[in-house]
Amino acid sequence: MSSVIVEQTNPLATSSSAIYNFKKGHDSFNDFILSYPRGAYTGMRTVGHGAILELNSHMKRVVNSLSLMKLCPPDGTIEPDIVSQQLASFRNVESFEEKLVPLIRAGLQAYYDQEPQAVETKVSLMVTYSYDLQQPCFAAHFGHLGQIPQQRVKVAMENKARTMPSVKDSQWVRDRALMEKKKPQDINEVILMDNADRIYEGMASNFFAVRQRHDLEEGETKSSYVIQCASLEHVLLGTVMKVVMALCEQEKIDIEWVFPKLHDARAGKWEGCFLTSTSRLLLPIETIYCKDGR
């Protein structure tokens, strides 16, 4: 599938003076992210061809991640003041929005010109600092948004958890590369868990379990189902996850912020489970494959 990468070559300039470089080719998401030094990234999708789903959430995610990260030189442990000054406009939501919206518009126009049959687009954003160029890097990748499976999907468990899950650090793209490479073709996602059978999230998704509740009193209007998800101190708050949270509140479905336990699934205590992500939206899970073969 073809792609378009748009990079602002003068990232410190205002949007009215922005100069964009367009690279058309077949670069994948991983190719794009890993071509830059470690930094903050996020993956977005269009809705209605030209709008970005939960754009404000994505902007805040990048700003928050950059604020929590320290982009130090290769041989240092402290972010220099000059680097912090140059990144200041990317660590503020208002100034970042002024830069981001024109870049997304330019990229979508270029991508749809190249792929006029495309209905929707996957948009990946990268912000970091290059010590070679002595300036921030600010770029976006526009590519094919695959069809969402119409049937339940299969997932595989992996004993691994992210460090600083609240930060969208591109180092995670490097760390998960081996898991992605080993993932069988019929497996939709790899789910992260620990030695205590506690389930965290997917490599690039949020994970939810559904159980039936047995504590409803007569006359209560709450749903008879409860959703379980690892608490936000342990997993990233995904943009589609926020939509699920809003729907649960609307439908009076309680969310338990506790780790779903794999042994509960094996004991038949779940009614089901599902994934959410920007590209998947919401996918019900059919089969969970574990390393012990059970």
Image: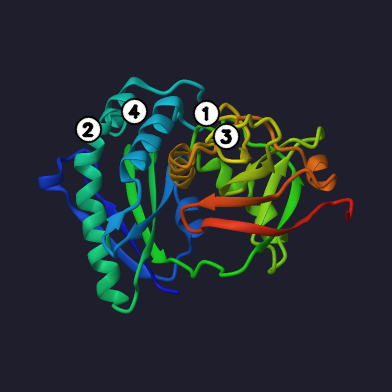
Q: Which residue type carries mark 3?
A: Ile
Closer to the camera: disc 2 or disc 1? 2
> Residue at label 3?
255
Closer to the camera: disc 1 or disc 4? 4
Secondary structure of the residue carrying tag 4 is helix
Q: CA distance from mark 2 to mark 3?
A: 32 Å
> Would you say 93 lies left or right of 270 here?
left
User: Which residue is more in the foreground, 23 or 89?
Assistant: 89
> Which label's residue is closer to the chain start, 4 or 3?
4
Closer to the camera: disc 4 or disc 3? 3
> Residue at label 2?
94
Residue 150 sits above or below residue 178 on the image: below
Q: Which residue type carries mark 1?
A: Asp
> Which label's residue is closer to the chain start, 2 or 1?
1
Q: Which residue type carries mark 2?
A: Glu
> Which label's residue is closer to the chain start, 2 or 4?
4
